[in-house]
Each structure stands twice: as C-alpha cells, then as structure tokens.
Image (tube, helix red, strand yellow):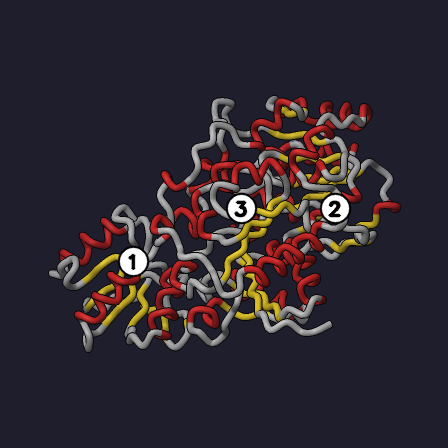
Amino acid sequence: MKKSTKRIGITCTSIFHYVHFKYIVNELRERGFNVDYIIYTPKYTNNRFERIEKYFKDNNERFQSFEDVFSGNVKYDALLAPYFMPGFELLDSSIIKIRIMYGYAKDSWNYAEWNKGFDLILSYGPYATKRLINYTEVVEIGHPRVRLDYKNEIIDINGRSFIKVECQKPILVYCPTWANLSSLEIFTTYLTEITIHFEVIVKLHHGNVLAGSHESLKVIKQNQDLYLFDDHTDLFDLLNAADIILSDYSGAIFDAMIFKKPIILLDVIPEYIRETGQVNLSNMLNVNSSFSKESFANFTTSLDIAIREILSHVREKNELLNTLIDALERNTVTYESLLEKLYYSIDTRGSVRGATAVENFLIENDSSGIIIDNSLQVVNIEKVKDFLHFNSGETITIWGAGEIGQIIYVYLKSQGYSINFLYDGDTNKQGKNFYDKQISSILIYSKVLIATANAYQFIKETLEKKGLHEGLDFISIFSRDDI
C-alpha cells in the first residue's frame, strides 16, 4: 500500500484512551498513515504522564508529548481526541480536529458546546448523532472496540490469572464510575456475601485509578476473593466473559448492552438528580477550568438516568444480592430494542468504519481545519502577547504549573517569548523539573501571567497586597473573567 504523507496525532490523557482508540489507529496505520499517540496531560507534576509513558514504552508504542505539539517540533495534519483538549485553540487552525466518541453517559458533558471545536465527530449511533449534528459534521461508526478476538486469559493487577472456563460460580463483572457518582464504597460493604455466590471481577474506572488511595480502593485491592482490573485492561474482554453486569452511572452500562447480558444498576445519588454530567463536572479539572457551566448543553435527563426506566436498579442496598441472583436466573434482556438507536451497527467493523471516515475526511478537507469558535477561546492569547510585548525585557512568571500552565509555557517559548519562572502553590509540584525550568516554591513578584483557573480572585488579592496592579503587572491568561 502506498504510504500516506498525512501525520495524525491521537491525544490521550489516560491509558483508557489508548485502549479505546487503538483499533482505529491500527486500521489507519494499515492504510499507510503516520500515527503517533500524544501524552496530553501535565508532565512531572503527578504520576499520570509517567504512567502513560511507561505503558507506551512497555508496549513498544510510538508516542510524543504535548510539548512536541505546542513547541512545533512535530507537525500534524490531524488530531484525534476524546474531547476538546486544553490549548487546542492555540494550535494552527489548519490542523483538522476529529473527536472519537468514547461513552454514552452524562449527556450534558457528552453533548456540550465544546463539540463545536471539531471538524468531524465519529459517533456511536443515532442517539448521539441527533445531539451532535448541530455542532459539526458527524459520521456514525458503531463501537470501535467490538471485535472477534476477545482474550480467554486475563491477568489482573495482583498477578492473578482469570480464565472463564475454570470458574465454578457465575461471573459478575462490576464496573463502577468514578468520583461522587461511584457506587464503589457501597459495593465494598456487600462484597463478602456477593463473593459467596459469584466469581467477582471488578473493573476500575480510570478516574478512580488515577485518583489515589481512597479507602474503598484499599478494601478492593486487599480482597483475595475477586479479580481486580484497571485501565490497562479492555473492559470488552471482561464483558465477553461475564454472566451478569453490575454498574451505576458509568458509560460501561451501554458497553455491556452490546453483549446482551443481564445488567443491574446501583443507585447512589438522590432520585431528583436527573442530569449526571453536571454532578461530575467539578471533578473534571481539565474541562471545568476551561468552560463556563453555560457552555454545557441543558439536557434534562442523562441517558444513564433514563435507562433506569428499563434496567433493574437497586436503591435499597440490602436488596442487591437477591436482585442479582434473580436477574441471573431470569436471564432476560429488556433493552435489546434500544440497541439500534444507540449503535449504528453491532458488528466488528466499527474500527474499519472509523478509519474510513477519517481517511475520507482528510482527503476531502485537505488542510482546511476550522477556525475555533470564539466561545471556545479559553486562552486570550492576544491579551497575553500584548502584555508580554508591553513588558519586554521584564522578568516574567507563570503562576500555575498545571496542564494549561505547562501548555502556555511551551507555546509562548516556541513563539520566541522569554518566561523566567514557573510557580505553583501545590507542594506536590514544587521542585519538579518541567522543560528547562524547575517549578518554584517561591513566587517572584515581577510580571505575572496567571494560569490557574478558579482561583483568580484570591491570586489577584494576593498580588495587589504586594503592590502589583492588574493589567499592568499581572493578568489572567483566560478569556473568561470568572475563571
């Protein structure tokens, strides 16, 4: 096959994104495209970057970092992403941006205004397309992870080998979501009695994996009567082995439907909450720090709530075990008629259709990426450049060494601007090296670019007490005044 001259970057903030995208990537590579994964998460300030980096190296996978993108070291014709990433609006508008859908939960998040930042969206099917089509061009591909070759043996994070044919009890796959929508804490309370009746597999959400040492996670990790998997494992391999699935408000609900097995849901939030996207938004720092709440679509009911009209769900937790046993005995699938609304097709060609859609779009829209809508201009780069021009020769400090702080640092450096210091009040970041700077624990009161979201008023007051003046000595890099 003739090798394409097109270079495509796949933005990943977690190993899960790699697992989700890899089948489309493999198809693109077979067609001759030059494809890299991009680690798109803060570097050396937590273990996320290093965790993905190690995974890629262990799997001999080709990758770059967001530094390479924003410094201009690597040029891409297109970027494929799970959502609109911080800093996208700073990139050359000729770079085509394509979203690959990765879940069916939390409607106000999934179908928010940031979808306008994409030239093309690959959706699962009619339900998503109806909600995305007003933003940009949409192509339905089904689910890219449906395939024939599911694993028969899977090693969990404790080194235990799960083999379905060796199990003496029915297999329960439990896949909770994360943060304040997660049922993990409640599940651990009933774990002992559940493991008596079921071979239990727990598939952690990547958000829980990255969140650290929550008490419920410790309980799960120490339990020898279950198999525990993290984001290294494709959920589809586990769902294929399951006899019954337990979840809460996770997108895994709709992944599980593809396998047409009994599904039970745990209710952990008040019944009056109908839209789960807003519930988790405060935990999604890379999104919440970028857009106002008004930029998230005003959906009245999330699909993960609406599906409870069809699927069995449990609020009284002492009914959980009996509900699971009853559902397994009945082995009824109440949701099959929904599948044609959710998925273009349930076959093994989702990744092929995805790669074809990308290939066709790149051929038809050569170097014609969209100009980002003003409502998506998170960083006011013209204001930043004017400030730097006015203060040419002065000592410049960026306050905030998180994701957007690191991105703006690399971007400005590539544009020829001199940044003297990176400061962050987070002791976990202080002293770490990033690029050619060490993240300082001491703020140099000079000229300051504030790249920390949701704390502007506090920072402003702090700087003004030191005699600095807004607009003259310091500015926020953001377009919105309320960040």
Label pair 3/2, CB-CB below 8 angstroms: no
Image marks 3 and 1: residues in contact by CB distance under 8 Å: no
Q: Give the quarter of the image for residue 67.
A: bottom left
Q: State which tag comes first along the sequence, 3 or 2.
A: 3
Q: At label 1, which amino acid type do we have?
A: Asn
Task: Give the vertical position of 325 relative to 143 (above or below).
Answer: above
In this rendering, the count of numbered labels is: 3
Q: Is 182 situated above or below 386? A: above
Give x and y (percent) for residue 181: 53, 36
Residue to which mark 1 is pinned? 380
Say whether disc 3 or disc 1 marks the residue closer to the N-terminus: 3
Q: Amino acid at mark 2?
A: Leu
Percent across and percent down for residue 381 are: 30, 62
Q: CA distance from mark 2 to mark 1?
A: 45 Å
**Picture residue at 30% right of the left edge, 55% below the top:** 478
**Which is nearer the N-term, disc 2 or disc 1?**
2
Going 64% across and 71% down the picture, which residue do you hit? 4
Identify the element where label 1 is drawn.
loop
Disc number at residue 214? 3
Image height of 385 relative to 115, above or below: below
Query: Looking at numbered disc 3 in the image, what kind of residue is underneath it?
Result: His
Quadrant location, the N terminus: bottom right
> According to the image, label 2 marks what residue?
238
The answer to whether residue 51 is seen in the rendering is no
Asked whether the beta carbons under mark 2 and mark 1 sit within 8 Å of each other, the answer is no
Compared to residue 71, the image places residue 185 above or below, namely above
Which mark's residue is nearer the viewer, 2 or 1? 1
C-alpha gap between disc 3 and disc 1: 37 Å
Residue sitting nearer the eye, 84 or 270:
84
Asked which quadrant contains residue 178, the reply is: top right
x, y (%) of residue 350?
A: 70, 50
Q: What is the CA distance from the residue labelled 3 to the residue labelled 2?
A: 24 Å
